[in-house]
Amino acid sequence: MVFKKAVAKKVVKKAGESKYVKVAKELTELMGLDPAIDTSVDEEELQGLLVEAGGMLDANDTISDLATEVLTELGVELPSGEEEEEEKPAKKVVKRAATTKPAKKVPMKTAAKVEEEEEEEEEEETAAKVEEEEEEEEEEGDELDDLDRSGLKKFIAENELDIKVFKSMKDDDIRAAIRALAEPEEEEKPAKKAPAKKAAPMKKAVKKEEVEKGPTRPEVFKDIMEEGGGTFDEIKAEFIERFQGSEAEAGYKIQQFLRLLLTMGYVEKSAKGKYTLVG
């Protein structure tokens, strides 16, 4: 999809056109979408397509007041033109205990105290080493960081991912889309064994519990459909409540899931607009 960096042209008004159809035509012309946004679908599907297209606008695109009103109503966050620089987390400096000390004659009565101090030093060194290894693991990226644009497209094709790559997308945007879809299939890295002599500090166990993931987007959607489904708005509201995502993201994901399941014949839509599982 190619963005045209120019002021949006006035949309030709036709009798009987809804505001969603008008905005769809405006975005198609502004961004040079190919294929164009399908305005023959029902209103709910058209709203989902507008959310998808609106998410690809950038700060240089100028849209009409009507488009601004409609996209804001659908929960699309319009670009403000201000790019926030991501602040890299400051690297922790681990202060290591000295490993050598000047030779000193210790009276026999303090031998127990010296042994206790040596054990404390060993514990501090072990804890510092474990913390440093964890920081190195956090800084390491995944295999996608080493792929260029053509490599990312090949990765999408080989893994049969439902991702459309547009010319306006940056390489980092493609990587983010791949990670979002590959998230449920990611395997957890095996935890490193702690040194046999000294156990890792208790705070490390707490940190491991905090990073455990909850249900994925497909799992949340599956639960909602198995519980009876509903209209597009009902499913979206329930999805947002359970997954705690944004309204724009929920509308886009649900639109993708429903369109795929309707095509495969696993979901049917009633005359009242309610989506339910077949059988």
Image: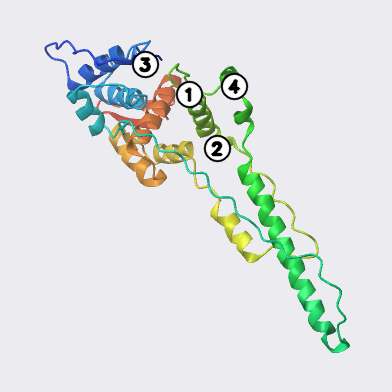
Image disc number at residue 184: 2
User: What is the three-letter code of the residue carrying label 2?
Assistant: Pro
- Rendered view: 105 above or below 54: below
Residue 18 located left or right of residue 36: left
Q: Is residue 3 visible?
A: yes
* Label located before the other in sequence (2 or 1): 1
Q: Which residue is mark 3?
A: 3
Is 118 in front, or is 44? Answer: 118
The residue singled out by tag 4 in the image is 148
Mark 1, residue position: 170
Disc 1 crowd rating (10 Å Cα; few below 14, some 14-19, many 20+) is few
**Image position of 179 with respect to 111: above or below:** above
Label 2 and label 1: CA atoms lie apart by 23 Å
Along the polypeptide, which appears first: circle 2 or circle 3? 3
Q: Mark 1 or mark 4, which has the lower sequence index?
A: 4
Determine the image quadrant of residue 261.
top left
As drawn, is 230 to the left or to the right of 12? right
Residue at mark 2 to residue at mark 4: CA–CA distance = 24 Å
The amino acid pointed to by label 4 is Asp
Q: Secondary structure at mark 3?
A: loop
Q: Earlier in the sequence, mark 2 or mark 4?
A: 4
Q: Label 4: few (<14), some or many (≥20) within 10 Å?
A: few
